[in-house]
Amino acid sequence: MKLLPNNFYAFPAIANTTMSSEDLKELLLNTEGWALIRGHMWEIKTKLLGAGVYKVWIEQKNMIK
């Protein structure tokens, strides 16, 4: 099962990684596009870099509307 690397749990505001489209698909299917880190909801964000490679980072979800 594909999970976020450990640096996302230690330093969520600055963590990022790259992964293949297959790994990203597995990650998003397993997490539904979000993670609970340090008591806060974080949304998984991606950007296609090209050739099936994605940059992955997280942004804190604002729960107050």
Image (cartoon, rainbow, N blue to C red):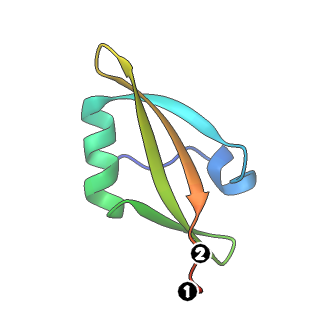
Say whether residue 64 is left or right of residue 56.
Answer: right
Locate residue 27, reporting x and y percent.
Answer: 34, 49
**Residue in view at x 43 percent, y 33 percent:** 47
User: Is residue 58 depicted above or below 52 in this figure?
Assistant: below
Locate residue 11, reporting x and y percent.
Answer: 75, 51
Say whether residue 12 is left or right of residue 20.
Answer: right
**Residue in view at x 28 percent, y 30 percent:** 21
Location of the C terminus (image quadrant): bottom right
Locate residue 45, reporting x and y percent.
Answer: 46, 48
Badge 2: residue crowd in 10 Å (few <14, some 14–19, many ≥20): few
Q: Are marks 2 and 1 in contact (CB under 8 Å)?
A: yes
Residue assigned mark 2: 62
**Residue in view at x 36 percent, y 62 percent:** 31
Residue 56 in view in this figure = yes
Say whether residue 21 is left or right of residue 44.
Answer: left
Residue furthest to the bottom in view is: 64
User: Is residue 40 depicted above or below 54 in this figure?
Assistant: below
Residue furthest to the top in view is: 51
Give the quarter of the image for residue 41: bottom right
Residue furthest to the front in view is: 65
User: Is residue 32 depicted above or below 51 in this figure?
Assistant: below
Locate residue 53, reporting x and y percent.
Answer: 37, 22
Residue 1 in view in this figure = no
Question: In the image, which is nearer the foreground, mark 2 or mark 1?
Answer: 1
Badge 1: residue crowd in 10 Å (few <14, some 14–19, many ≥20): few
Q: Amino acid at mark 1?
A: Lys
**Residue in view at x 59 percent, y 86 percent:** 64
Residue assigned mark 1: 65
Q: Amino acid at mark 2?
A: Asn
Work out how far the residue at label 2 is from the one at label 1, CA to CA, in angstroms.
8 Å
Say which element carries label 1: loop
Say whether residue 14 is left or right of residue 56.
Answer: right
